[in-house]
Image (tube, grey):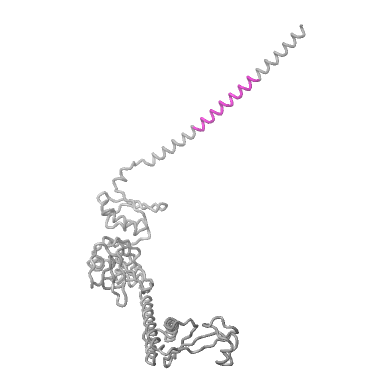
Amino acid sequence: MNVEFIQALDDIEKDKGISKDVLLEAIETALVSAYKKDFGSKDNVRIEISAEAGEVKVYSRKEVVEEVENKNSEISLTEAENIDSKYDIGDIVEIEVTPANFGRIAAQTAKQVVMQRIREAERDVIFDQYKEKEDDLITGTIQRFHNDNILIDMGKTEALLPPSEQIAGERYEIGERIKLYVVEVSTTNKGPRILVSRTHPGLLKRLFEIEVPEIFQGLVEIKAVAREAGQRSKMAVSSSDSQVDPVGACVGPKGMRVQAVVDQLNNEKIDIVKWDDNPEVFVANALNPAEVVSVNINKSDKIAEVVVPDFQLSLAIGKEGQNARLAAKLTGWKVDIKKESEIEAEPENIEEIEQSAAELAESLDEFEETEKDTELDKTETVTEKTAEEAESDNQVDIQAEEDAEELEKLD
């Protein structure tokens, strides 16, 4: 190494933000390993690099002992005193053992270490940069395909779009720029791993935040999103200003705002509904575009029983149950949809029937109690008769004994 190399370390510290002292420490550690490997040494050595001139020296470190047992790490007191009379038992003696051609090895090793540290520093910078973008929107260019995965060029790094996060039926072409939702940023041995998605509900939310100024200003809030990527989504919105229509703000003039989002999502259909704190109203809104006659909330079972006009049943349920399924995801309630004619067909005197059933059950209970009392009376009567018969039999026996005694007297 030379003066130019040390100056290069100063430039790296300024440009990359990597401390010169940290680099020198890393180079020294690497040179210890290189020295032991190339020269077959087992000594305990220390590397010293001059921070000004870049000169490299190798020192063997040995402990002063009375009797040497390990020549690689120990030196006798006599040998130590020959070097310097100040040494005593337990001191560490350093002896320079720099090989003649060690400068070339040192330069190669130092270059490798510096390059590795630069790569690590760049990885750390990229990780920190994209870690802040978790749960946010980014734009990337499709770079290449690997098996079913798509690798997205992000400039200084790549992002991974796995099959599970791709919209079914959406076509991807190399060089195409697309918007993506950052699901997770993690570290690996090869650098940061950026997992992105085209199916995450957060992508829909972030796209509306870009297209709708009222959301950015805080006047309109996206309360919930339910999505079946590439097919249909539902989004519930509310407004903090009574004069701002949250649904209208998201739809935009002539539907321009919502259409801009639809164009980004492979023509995915999007229903925008108004959020309401009342679950009955919210469930009814969530089933849009179907009309709802009534909603009955069963809080214990978390079920919303919905009644719709007969001609609206298929619309409320949706193709393969999609509308009802998305409404359930959006509201958090299980949605049970019935048509109006089914409700009307139920008996009007249902309350009278229930009351009659209750009275009948009560009469049965009273009848059972009466039967029990009758059985008890019969048992008591039988018991009394048995006692009287026993008493009568006893009196007969006594009379027989008295008659027998009278006969004996006569004899």
Q: Is residue 98 left or right of residue 388?
A: left
Residue 154 in the image, given as x and y percentages of width and height = 30, 75
The quarter of the picture where residue 246 lies is bottom left
Q: Residue furthest top?
A: 411
Name the side, left or right, on which 242 lies relative to 375.
left
Q: Can residue 106 be seen here?
A: yes
Residue 346 x %, y %: 33, 43
Q: Nearer the viewer, residue 96 or 193?
A: 96
Name the quadrant of the N terminus.
bottom left
Front residue of 101 and 202:
101
Quick check: is 161 in the magenta stretch?
Answer: no
Image x and y of residue 236, in percent: 32, 62
Asked whether residue 252 appears in the rendered view, the answer is: no
Which residue sits at x=63%, y=22%? 387
Q: How many marks?
A: 0
Q: Main secondary structure of the magenta part?
A: helix
| Occupied quadrant, residue 168 | bottom left
Toward the viewer: 162 or 374?
162
| Foreground residue among 402 and 1 | 1
The residue under the point 66% across, 20% down is 391
Q: Is residue 5 above or below residue 380?
A: below
The image quadrant where one finds the C terminus is top right
Give percent across and percent down for residue 132: 37, 74
> For the magenta stretch, what is the residue range?
368-390
Residue drawn where x is 42% and y is 38% of the image: 357
Q: Is 227 rendered above or below residue 186?
A: above
Q: Is residue 377 magenta?
A: yes
Image: 354 above or below 125: above
